[in-house]
Amino acid sequence: MRRREFMTLVGCAVVAVPVAARAQQRVMPVIGFLNSASADGYTVMADAFKQGLKETGYIEGQNVAIEYRWANNAYDRLPGLAADLIKRQVAVIVANSPSIAPAMAATTTIPITFLSGDDPVRLGFVTSLAKPGGNATGVTIFSGGLAAKRLGLLRDLVPQAKIVAVLINSDWPAAVRFQTDVEEAAHVVGLSIQILRANNESEIDDAFNGLAQTQAGALLVGPGPFFDSRRDKLIALAAKAGVPAACESRATATLQRPCNGFVIKTWHPMSTYLTGARRSTSRVSANCTTSPMAASTPNVHRSSQCTCPRCAAEYCGP
């Protein structure tokens, strides 16, 4: 009897070990990383995000898993990719600008942490900065409203330019507003605008091949994840053409050192909101706190306007 009891216990143990292992795997939280761009073009941003996770105590592969879904700049793939993450039962979804709407359409219960380049209130992602409501919160850099300012700076830097070429990713949802703002600003200051469109690699080449025909004295590169992920190519082509170019950020404009303050200031703090987002997204303070992770709920971080000491030193400063 003892021998049979012993063998029975051993058999139970053999069965129990893999069951326990599977249970531990299920306990590990899974982050859904939904991005409209490509993995190779967004390596720097993804690394900054993972570094932020690490600083809050989460290390990929050890106590958190990340499911990456890249649309490779094919925005029509985003709804399907979002639905796939829902089926995967992720704990939270991290979305860049073009991915926010598909993620929100896919779920009203799974928390969504986003990085938006435009006003999330105007776009309908949140009710207000002070109280986003719903299941979405995140970081907004308000770059979408700075088109006129960037054109003005380019005019100051290249005063001899009477014609400015404007490169636009027309697939990006905010492209129409960007083009309208640039055209209105150009009319005010007496500049001529030539619109160039590029939604994929070959169209970038075509745009720069046609740049000489525009007789433009300067180039304004529009915002958006696609151009961010192709920053090296854009700057190399602009340098080859000998045309002064202004970009949305230093992340786009820096050829040799793309990992700069702008990248850290946008993708790094997103990770600090994940724990808060999992707790609640219904009541959110718009005021920055010393430690977002310590707050009961996350903030909609106003990285282009906030003046609190933490932001001035780490996230929002020049």
Image (spheres, rainbow, N blue to C red):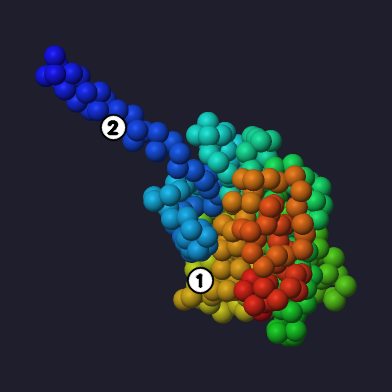
Asked if residue 144 is positioned above or below residue 8 in the image, the reply reads below
Q: What element carries label 1?
A: loop
The residue positioned 85% from the left and 65% from the top of the image is 184
Question: What residue is rendered at 74% in x and 73% in y?
Answer: 308
Q: Name the residue under label 2.
A: 17
Image position, residue 231 (x, y; %)? 53, 66
Residue 161, image x, y percentages: 72, 81
Residue reaching furthest to the right:
188
Mark closer to the chain start, 2 or 1: 2
- Type of amino acid at the residue the image marks with label 2: Val
Query: Split into 4 quadrants, where in the image is the C terminus?
Result: bottom right
Image location of residue 50, percent across then percent down: 48, 59
CA gap, disc 2 and disc 1: 44 Å
Q: Tell me the SS state at disc 2.
A: helix
Q: Name the residue under label 1.
A: 259
Q: Report the residue at 39% width, 50% height from top.
A: 61
